[in-house]
Amino acid sequence: MKKLDIISMGETMVELYGSGSLSQSPVFHKSYAGDTMNMISMASKLGLRCGYITNVGDDPFKDYLLDEWKSLNIDLEFTRIIEGFNGVHFTVLQNDNNRQFVYYRKNSAASKLDSKSINEDYLKSSKIFHTSSLTQCISDSARETVSEFLIKSKSLGITTSFDTNFRSNIWSASDAKNAILDVIKYIDILSPSYPEEVNKVFELDTPVDMIKFGLAQGCKLVVVKCGEEGAYIGNSNRIIYAQPITPKGLLDTTGAGDSFLGGFFYSYIKDMNLEDNMRYAITSAGLKVSARGGIQSQPSKNEVEKYLDLVKVEEINRH
C-alpha cells in the first residue's frame, strides 16, 4: 500500500456558481467544492501525498468528479462508487463580496458514509487523518462514521485533525457544538474559525480563549482562522498570530480557510516550526483569494514560497 501524508474524509459537491444573486444570475458555471477536498487539493499542489475517503454517486457527474480528483494526484482507493446522486450547491459572489449558498445534499451518496470504509492498513499508511463538522452534519450515519474514524485513527497513533466548519443554514450552533464535543477528546489538531464558530458554537469571546479551551480538552494544537483578521496558532507552550496578506488582491474568499489548512499541513508534515506553519498557511490563503473559486484559484508551491516573507508572525501573551 502506498505511503500517504494525509487522508481526508468528507463530501464534495458539484458546484454551480453564478454572479449577482441566485435569483438573477443568468448563467451558472460548473465546478466542485467541499471543505475536506479543498484542503487536500491545496496540500497536494504543495507536494503532499493525499488520499480521499468519500462516496460518489453513479449519476452523470461521477466521471467529472473522479477525473478532476485524479488530475490532482489524489489517491482514491477508498472512494466508493455507489448508487445515488452527488450533492449539488448553487452559489454566487454578490456585489458586496458576500457569498450566497443553496445546498441540495439530503440523501446524497456521501450522506451514506459508513464504517465499512475503515481500513486499518490504509489509515496506517498516512501521517494524518482529517475530517470536519461539515461532514458530521450530512446525516446520522456520517456523524457516527466521523466518530468511528477519529477513534480508530487515534488508537493507531495517527495524528487526527478536525475542522469545525459550521453552517447555520444546515444545523444549529447547539447541535454542532454537541457533535464536536462528542469527539473532541479524539482530536489532536482542532481548526475553528473566528468569530463564527468561536462565538456562536463554542460561546467563547476571543481566539486565545478558543486555543485555551481546545488545549484543555486534550487537543495538542489549535489553529484559529480569523479571515480578514488573520490567524492564531497555539500549543501548550506558546501562541502566535499573523495578519493576512493579499499580494495579488482580494476577489473571492471562498475556500480560503481550506487553502489555509492545506498550507498549514504541508509545513506541519515537513516538520517546520510554528512560525513557518503560519507563513505557509497565511500565504496559501492570501493567494487563493485573488481569483474566483475554491480550488481553481489555489496557488502553486512556487507562488506560495515567493511570498512567504511577507507574513509577519508575532508572539501572543497567553494571559
Image (cartoon, rainbow, N blue to C red):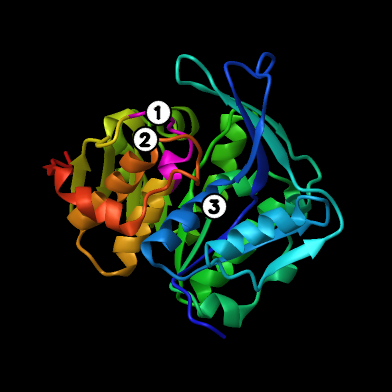
* Residue type highlighted by circle 1: Leu
At horizontal 31% and vertical 44% (from top left) the residue drawn is: 211
User: Can you identify the residue that label 3 sits on?
Assistant: 36
Between the residue at mark 2 and the residue at mark 1, the CA separation in whole angstroms equals 5 Å
**Which numbered marker is on residue 290?**
2
Nearer to me, 100 or 70: 70
* Residue type highlighted by circle 2: Ser
**Vertical position of residue 293 compared to residue 132: above or below:** above
Residue 82 image point, x, y percent = 82, 61
At horizontal 54% and vertical 52% (from top left) the residue drawn is: 36
Image: magenta residue range? 250-258
Tell me the SS state at disc 2: loop
User: Can you identify the residue that label 1 sits on?
Assistant: 251
Q: Quadrant of residue 115?
A: bottom right
Q: Residue furthest right?
A: 83
Residue 265 image point, x, y percent = 37, 60
Looking at the rendered image, the disc whose residue lies closer to the viewer, 1 or 3, is: 1
Packing grade of label 3 (10 A; few <14, some 14-19, many >=20) is many
Determine whether, in the image, residue 213 is placed left or right of residue 247.
right
Residue 167 inside the magenta-drawn segment: no
Tell me the SS state at disc 1: loop
Pointer 2 with pointer 1, Cβ within 8 A: yes
Between the residue at mark 3 and the residue at mark 2, the CA separation in whole angstroms equals 21 Å
